[in-house]
Image: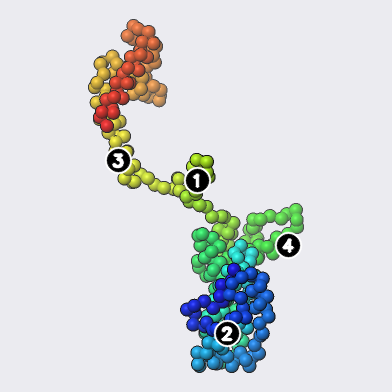
Amino acid sequence: MIPSVLPAGTGLAVASPWSMVPALGNLDAYISAVNKLPLLTPEEEQEYARKLREHDDLEAAGKLVLSHLRLVVSVSRKYVGYGLPQGDLIQEGNIGLMKAVKRFDPDQGVRLVSYALHWIKAEIHEYILKNWRMVKVATTKAQRKLFFNLRSMKQGFKDEADAPTHRDTLTDAQVDVMAHDLGVKREEVLEMETRMSGGDVVLDPTPAGDGEEAFGPISYLTDVRHEPTAVIEAHQRDRLASDGLAAALEQLDPRSRRIVEQRWLQVNDDGSGGLTLHDLAAEYGVSAERIRQIEVAAMKKMRLALAAYA
């Protein structure tokens, strides 16, 4: 869908000439319409540019923009490979064209098409960099240059390679060639190659459905150590593991306490546990089953004491 080529607020909106271009509708219909618009002669271009500069003639501005809409369409075709809708690219290019018309100086001795080309590309470049990825891949001037040249140069290397040696990654020699031709460091080429080859990752994905829980980087990137509820829970666990456990052991008779300590709280130097049921049975002169029953009763009593302590 192509919006109005002169949105409100630009200072270049005119009434009658824009009826020749469909404001909304099919992209092919829009392109067909702008290709039928007549081009201006150099004399007409100079005349309308002077009217705009000297008299703020919006009708003249509209004619200058209309006659160059096909240029925007032509430029936009070069950027469709970035996966963004051509209609959006055309819209951004039209904004650049309007900026160029507003700033065009007819006394500079150049045609508007040459002057506007820079503005059209600048707006399309900015749009692509903002929308190609969720996270910006190019911020500095060198990175922007790399972004718009790396893929085309890489494709050139692929076309030169034989089919059996075809590969997606760059060789050291190819990296050196790119760095030399683009005037950047080879490390910058490698970094941009890594950025462009990687994809976006959703930090907090939605559940997959049917009660399944989604798992994403947010699950292991989140630091909950200082989250209030986590701090309170950790403090409570520490109290139960120290003061609470000591209070629960105080509720047991000496034999039950020794059995629990030897079975669950004793750790030897080699990492092994304390005495076994049979060891304790031999010590107290009873069966291993009897020791197990005493242990179960003691653990139940301790759980009640811990619950009351908490």
For the question of whether residue 178 can be seen, the reply is no
Residue occupying the point 71% across, 55% down = 166
Mark 2 vs 4, N-terminal side: 2
Mark 4 vs 3, N-terminal side: 4
Q: CA distance from mark 4 to mark 1?
A: 46 Å
The answer to the question of whether label 4 and label 3 lie on touching residues, with beta carbons closer than 8 A, is no
Residue indicated by mark 3: 232
Question: How many marks can you see?
Answer: 4
Q: Quadrant of residue 247?
A: top left
Q: Hey, which residue is sitting farthest top in the picture?
A: 285
243 relative to 296 in the view: left or right: left
Residue indicated by mark 4: 160
Q: Secondary structure at mark 4?
A: helix
Mark toward the viewer: 4 or 1? 1
Along the line of sight, the residue nearer the viewer: 11 or 77 = 11
Mark toward the viewer: 2 or 4? 2
Q: Residue 69's x, y, as percent?
A: 62, 79
Label 3 is placed on what type of residue? Ile
Residue occupying the point 49% across, 77% down = 8
Q: Residues within 10 Å of mark 4 (few under 14, many from 20)?
A: few
Label 1 is placed on what type of residue? Pro
Residue indicated by mark 2: 16
Q: Residues within 10 Å of mark 3 (few under 14, many from 20)?
A: few
Residue indicated by mark 1: 207
Which dot marks residue 273? none
Q: Residue 20's x, y, as percent?
A: 62, 81
Q: CA distance from mark 3 to mark 2?
A: 70 Å
Q: CA distance from mark 3 to mark 1?
A: 29 Å
